[in-house]
Image (cartoon, rainbow, N blue to C red):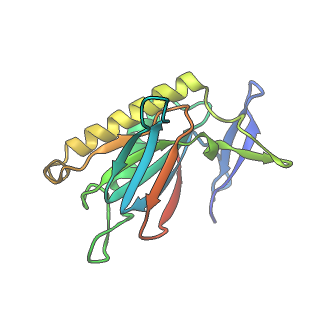
Amino acid sequence: MKPKTALSPDVSGSEVAVRKMSDGKFSTVLARTVLQQCVYARLQVKPPEEETPAEWVEIERGMVIYICFFKGATEDIIQKMVNTLLEVKLCEADSGKRMSVLELPGSVLIVPQATLGGKAKGRSMQYHGNIGKEEGLQLYTSFVSQCEKQLSSSSKCTEAGVAVKHGTYGNRQVLKLDTNGPYTHMFEF
């Protein structure tokens, strides 16, 4: 049985994401990510202005990570998230074998995605369970930094010249993505 995720009031009355585990116990969801393998991805991080063109970051083959933090999330979960997401075998090698983005080696594009914390209420979406903007920015920055550190510590990744690219937290961005899937997975921490 898969865990079921819902919003529930915590002791202060604020809504937090919780999931019911197969053993019947409840666990607080502190972050939600969606992983998608890609052959190419391009993210606009700054829109065009009068005299300047738009700014983009892009990656070749690798993985796009969409990420959202919930109320109650702290630095304590960052390393577990990075290890799990970079080491899970979701990327497809030329042979068809599944391997981690570190084993491939592949690049990583990290996209802040507050809408992953949305909950439908009637015909509208609410985001009451999401972490505050300042705390979210701190966790996002730490997550990006830890991903960069983990990729740069892999000699296979360094030799291949793969990198971590990322979007800007709290801004609307445009994403262009080519995938050999879709091969998309959600992870909750």
Establish if 23 lies above or below 173: below
Q: Is residue 79 left or right of residue 48?
A: left
Q: Residue at x 41, y 30 (%)?
A: 141
Question: Where in the figure is residue 126, as x and y percent of width and height?
Answer: 75, 39
> Which residue sits at x=41%, y=61%?
37
Q: Position of residue 169 (x, y in %)?
A: 50, 32
Residue at horizontal 32 percent and vertical 77 percent from the top: 96
Q: Residue furthest right?
A: 122
Q: How many marks?
A: 0
| Residue at the image position 63 percent from the left and 44 percent from the top | 115
Residue 3 x %, y %: 63, 57
Position of 63 compared to 33: left or right?
A: left
- The quarter of the displayed image where residue 9 is located: top right
- For the residue pair 47 and 162, the one nearer the viewer reads as 47
Along the line of sight, which residue is nearer the eye, 41 or 31?
41
Q: Is residue 189 left or right of residue 97?
A: right
Q: Is residue 83 visible?
A: no
Q: Quadrant of the N terminus?
A: bottom right
Image x and y of residue 24, in percent: 68, 54
Q: Is residue 149 above or below residue 108?
A: above
Depth check: give the residue in front, 187 or 11. 187
Q: Looking at this rendering, what residue extends furthest in the bottom direction?
A: 95
Describe residue 13's horizontal placement relative to residue 65 as left or right. right
Is residue 142 in sight in this rendering? yes
